[in-house]
Image: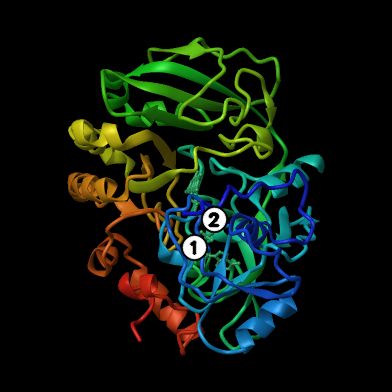
């Protein structure tokens, strides 16, 4: 099995090339993709290599016009991001369109406090560009290599009890609609809350407008051996103790492995405490998983938000790669009970696990967001690439989390069914109606969206 290597981003907005498609072509030993061309994708895999696409071609668009032409050509078509999802969400057995090759051309509107940028840009590249100009995003996910369009389409999040998911910063979208024509939607438009986490279900987003704020400094520190009883005794206090808090655990023992605490600081020299809820500050170097030594962002020294909020460095090989990921969102008020439920499964979970990460997000009103309507605690699992065993243990994890109405991450592996999705996402029916109205002929549907009731079955 050829494994597609991680897609490396650039430090500044990338040249108009399609890194995802290029990495695929190189990994498959095939010729580089033709500019403006398409490519049969017999071996196209997701970032971790654990999902093989069934699509027949990928159109690597260089301009919004090429996206329009690809959609106007007819048939089923879906947007492909940087392929960091772990399931068939981006696939359709037909034509995929990547917008990563469209020049990002970022434009800041200082009065509105927004940036508008080509939607295929990676978060890391956009963050570096904004930082150079004194601007910032409110938060970032763990991996900076993921595309803005793909990340926001699935409700991707970082951490911080006061920080909403990345999609909550989406203030406007330019997209190619089902009739092949360009459309725009802004935050004030009716139904916009259904589009911001859009799962590729209504069109292909070519440009995206995000809220920005003045640049800020972040210092991150790692604290080792965080006692479980301190976490279970005060989930809200622990996760809310800094701008962004991530807890890492393998679920065994009396302590979590580490807390990664990201503090917004006004002064780079500001002192930080040596203790965090009974955990000791670890001067580093920090390693949480089997991964290259130098792939994590810097701890112990304040720096720009763009270089501290992601866990992984933009200029290094991210994460382990040979892995499967799952994640569940529960109401933070049920946090301790949900953690205890998973902890009781540690004999089954730990042997298959690389690491789990526990994060928090603020409630939002986005219809398909994992944090819709409730303060959220996210329980993430990075599994070893042992699909059958992971599949089995996930059923146990899901049964244990069922009493907490745990919403699975759209881009990760789960056994979510349509009936359950309907219970977990109170606005799912509204989202489906909106998508059906915008795309009555089902141009952007796929099997997953039909199965989960996000689109009407054809
Ligand atoms: C190592 C790693 C770390 C991760 N860290 C986090 C994390 O910290 N937090 C978190 O929440 N998730 C995380 N994820 C999950 C990841 O953020 C999501 O799966 C995300 O959706 C992937 O984006 P992508 O660009 O790869 O999109 P893809 O996986 O290619 O596609 C995902 C969805 O986005 C849609 N889409 C893509 N581009 C467009 C477009 N232009 N227009 C319309 N729809 C589009 C696709 O149709 C599809 O439905 C991580 C994944 C990996 C592999």
Disc 2 element? helix
Q: Nearer the viewer, mark 2 or mark 1?
A: 2
Q: Which residue is mark 1?
A: 197
Q: Which residue is mark 2?
A: 151
User: Could you say which quadrant of the image residue 39 lies in?
Assistant: bottom right
| Of callouts 2 and 1, the N-terminal one | 2
Up/down of 79 relative to 233, above or below: below
On the rendered structure, is 334 left or right of 363? left
Mark 1 CB lies closer than 8 A to ligand 1: no
On the rendered structure, is 330 left or right of 85? left
User: Could you say which quadrant of the image residue 350 lies in?
Assistant: top left
Q: Residue at x 40, y 35 (%)?
A: 357
Up/down of 140 relative to 258, above or below: below
Up/down of 79 relative to 49, above or below: below
Mark 2 CB lies closer than 8 A to ligand 1: yes
Q: Nearer the viewer, residue 332 or 252?
A: 252
Q: Nearer the viewer, residue 332 or 399?
A: 399
Q: CA distance from mark 2 to mark 1?
A: 9 Å
Q: Residue at x 42, y 39 (%)?
A: 360
Disc 1 element? loop
């Amino acid at each position: 099995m050829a494994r597609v290597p991680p897609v490396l981003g650039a430090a500044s907005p990338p040249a108009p090339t399609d890194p995802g498609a290029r990495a695929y072509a190189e990994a498959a030993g095939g010729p580089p993709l033709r500019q403006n061309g398409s490519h049969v994708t017999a071996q196209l895999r997701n970032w971790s290599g654990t999902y093989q696409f069934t699509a027949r071609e990928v159109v690597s668009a260089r301009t919004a016009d090429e996206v329009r032409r690809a959609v106007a050509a007819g048939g089923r078509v879906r947007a492909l991001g940087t392929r960091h999802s772990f399931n068939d969400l981006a696939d359709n057995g037909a034509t995929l369109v990547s917008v990563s090759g469209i020049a990002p051309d970022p434009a800041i509107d200082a009065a509105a406090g927004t940036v508008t940028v080509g939607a295929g840009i990676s978060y890391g590249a956009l963050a570096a560009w904004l930082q150079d100009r004194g601007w910032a995003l409110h938060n970032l996910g763990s991996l900076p290599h993921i595309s803005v369009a793909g990340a926001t389409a699935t409700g991707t999040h970082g951490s911080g009890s006061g920080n909403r998911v990345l999609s909550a910063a989406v203030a406007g979208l330019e997209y190619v609609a089902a009739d092949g024509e360009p459309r725009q939607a802004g935050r004030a438009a009716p139904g916009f809350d259904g589009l911001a986490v859009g799962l590729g279900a209504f069109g292909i987003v070519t440009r995206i407008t995000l809220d920005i704020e003045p640049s800020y400094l972040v210092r991150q520190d790692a604290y080792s051996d965080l006692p479980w009883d301190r976490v279970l005794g005060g989930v809200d206090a622990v996760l809310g103790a800094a701008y962004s808090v991530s807890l890492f655990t393998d679920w065994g023992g009396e302590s979590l492995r580490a807390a990664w605490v990201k503090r917004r600081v006004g002064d780079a020299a500001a002192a930080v405490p040596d203790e965090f809820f009974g955990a000791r500050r670890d001067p580093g170097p920090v390693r949480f998983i089997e991964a290259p030594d130098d792939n994590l962002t810097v701890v112990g020294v304040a720096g720009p938000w763009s270089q501290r909020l992601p866990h992984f460095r933009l200029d290094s090989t991210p994460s382990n790669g040979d892995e499967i990921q799952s994640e569940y969102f529960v109401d933070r008020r049920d946090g301790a009970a949900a953690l205890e439920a998973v902890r009781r499964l540690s004999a089954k979970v730990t042997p298959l696990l690389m690491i789990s990460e526990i994060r928090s997000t603020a409630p939002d009103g986005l219809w398909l967001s994992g944090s819709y309507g409730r303060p959220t605690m996210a329980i993430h699992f990075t599994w070893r690439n042992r699909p059958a065993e992971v599949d089995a243990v996930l059923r146990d994890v899901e049964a244990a989390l069922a009493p907490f109405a745990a919403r699975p991450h759209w881009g990760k592996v789960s056994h979510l069914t349509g009936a359950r999705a309907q219970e977990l996402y109170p606005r799912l029916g509204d989202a489906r109606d909106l998508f059906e109205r915008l795309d009555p002929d089902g141009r952007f549907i796929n099997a997953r969206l039909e199965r989960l009731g996000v689109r009407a079955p054809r």
